[in-house]
Image (cartoon, rainbow, N blue to C red):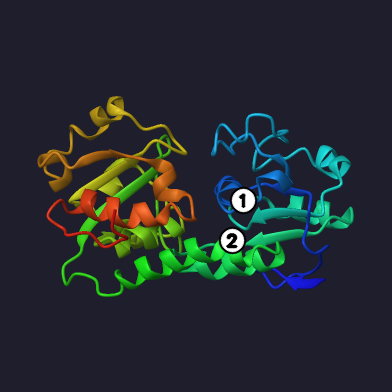
Amino acid sequence: MIVHDALGRRLDVKHPPQRIVSLVPSLTEWLFTIGLGARVVAVTDYCIEPAAALAGVPRIRGTKNPDRARIIALQPDLVIADQEENRARDVQALTAAGIPVYVTAIRSVADVPVQFEQLAAVLGASDQAAPGLAALRQALKATDRRPARRIPTLAFIWRDPWMAVGVETYAGDLLERCGAENLGCRLPGRYPRAPLETFMRLQPEVILLPDEPYAFSQRDFDAFEVYRDVPAVRNGRVLLCDGMTLTWPGLRALAALRDFATLIDPDTIGCGAPD
């Protein structure tokens, strides 16, 4: 079967593929969610959910350094990768070895139902995927009308160097849909890096510190103590949050659209799916 991935690359895929290697943690989780776990023959070290189901699945190192030789030896029908999560050189090497690699390119929450639906069709799993994607589309409609005043927010993903969520990112779009003005968009780059002082000059009213990819914790609050003139620091709005909910594209967005709306503005009614 000839298909095209999110980058427009042409693939000849066995339909439906029965031996899948996933190089994307969020997509690994989704494959199991829609009942395709039995087809997954290997995942990365960072594919940690669903934990129990993944206990016996072979690992092929990280998202940025997958063991290509082992992947080739597994003879998968399809490898699933993402433009941001994985390196182009690995995709090219696996493709050159005759293995079809389907690449997603998620840059917004709205990309999820579109691209996951396309991938589900390739996997022969459209029916299994449909209910969750329909629920996500419904939740997204509730975010189309955004508040007149958005709350200036910074979401960091790393320190030393300090890095934040910027333009054209899934996490940035999620925050905007939840009532934030993503201040990271004022600095250059999709994940701008700068001294903490530069970020603090943006005067955020909320600062989010997720527990991944950098494991922020309460010990990191000390770095902000010298910035008592910044509203988020002065008002105790430097907040720890769940990194997977913020950065993993997929059905986690159903909870994320609700939870981050409340985290950013505790007075909000909520912008995502109901409980």
Whole-percent x, y for residue 18 in the image? 78, 53
Residue at left offset 25%, top offset 45%: 207
Position of the N terminus, as image quadrant, is: bottom right
Residue at left offset 36%, top offset 44%: 156
Whole-percent x, y for residue 81 in the image? 67, 54
Q: Residues within 10 Å of mark 2 (few under 14, many from 20)?
A: some
Q: Is residue 254 left or right of residue 271?
A: right
Residue at left offset 89%, top offset 53%: 97
Q: Is residue 272 left or right of residue 169?
A: left
Question: Measured along the vertical axis of the image, is residue 93 above or below residue 132?
Answer: above
CA gap, disc 1 and disc 2: 7 Å
Q: Nearer the viewer, residue 77 or 87?
A: 77
Within the image, what quadrant is residue 177 found in? Answer: bottom left
Residue 260: mark in rendering: none
Q: Is residue 149 visible?
A: yes
Which mark sits nearer the N-terminus, 1 or 2?
A: 1
Whole-percent x, y for residue 5 in the image? 69, 68
Q: Is residue 176 left or right of residue 171?
A: left
Q: Residue furthest top?
A: 219
Residue linked to disc 2: 128
Residue linked to disc 1: 35
Whole-percent x, y for residue 221 in the image? 25, 31
* Residue type, mark 1 in image: Gly
Q: Is residue 90 left or right of residue 207?
A: right
* Residue type, mark 2 in image: Gln
Asked whether disc 1 touches disc 2, contact meaning CB atoms under 8 Å apart, the reply is: yes
